[in-house]
Amino acid sequence: MSVLAAANSHILCREFYQKDNRTQFWSNGSALLLRKNYGFLVDFRNRDWKKISRRDLGGEAFWTNLAGPTTVEMEPINDSNHLDQILTHAGEISQPIIIDWMASWCRKCIYLKPKLEKLSAEYDSKVQFYCVDVNKVPQALVKRGNIQKMPTIQLWKDGEIKEEVIGGHKAWLVIDEVRKMINKYL
């Protein structure tokens, strides 16, 4: 998918209209006309012609919630005391937390982490997301989480593990399972 950079960064939503061999992008009353057969971009705001590469351009890029973040970085848990503090705080506000138990050498863990960070943006104020690198923490913490396979995503509420998903399969399936798990406890 191609991204068209605009001089005004606040222009994010565009409506796409396809007629013949051209595509119009409408935003704030100004139109951008893309001629796919010639590989030229016409910007009617400035009356400039800009040459672009010839390739199929298309897209459906509509953002539904521009007010919130798109990703939220997961906070790492370093030891058992840190986990106790997190669980105490979550218990006080009656909020579930998600812990991603991962390893830096695990390819599936590395692939899954950015997808979980996107998911954490969806539940920004409702659920907190944390990660634990099992090679960088004391083994007592790993035993406390009863971790046997990685990646393991656990939902904790009221100081105890309620559910877990072991992410050895496709990332979109894991994210769907985590989403169902979260919605069950909200």
Image (cartoon, helix red, strand yellow):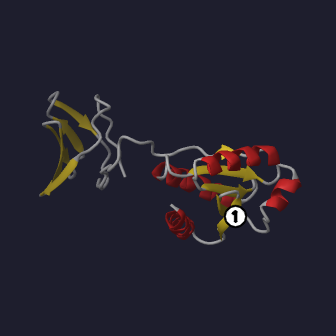
Rendered position, 91 above or below 156: above
Q: Image point 59% across, 56% down: which residue?
A: 96
Mark 1, residue position: 161
Answer with left or right where residue 132 lies relative to residue 30.
right
Q: Picture coordinates of residue 56 (x, y %)? A: 30, 56
Answer with left or right where residue 167 lies relative to residue 16.
right
Query: How many numbered tags mark residues here?
Result: 1
Nearer the observer, 151 or 55: 151
Q: Picture coordinates of residue 70 (x, y %)? A: 45, 45
Nearer the observer, 131 or 124: 124
Q: Picture coordinates of residue 171 (x, y %)? A: 56, 65
Q: Image point 65% across, 66% down: which residue?
A: 162
Rendered position, 108 above or below 75: below
Q: Inspect this view and state whether residue 181 appears.
A: yes
Crowd tier of the residue under label 1, counting other residues whose Cα lies within 10 Å: few below 14, some 14–19, many 20 or above: some
Of the residues shown, which amino acid type is indicated by label 1?
A: Ile
Q: Inspect this view and state whether residue 152 appears.
A: no
| Residue 52 falls in image quadrant | top left
Q: Picture coordinates of residue 4 (x, y %)? A: 31, 40
Which residue in the rendered view is the most extreme toward the right? 139
Q: Image point 23% across, 46% down: which residue?
A: 14
Q: Image point 79% across, 65% down: which residue?
A: 146
Q: Report helix, strand or loop for mark 1.
A: strand
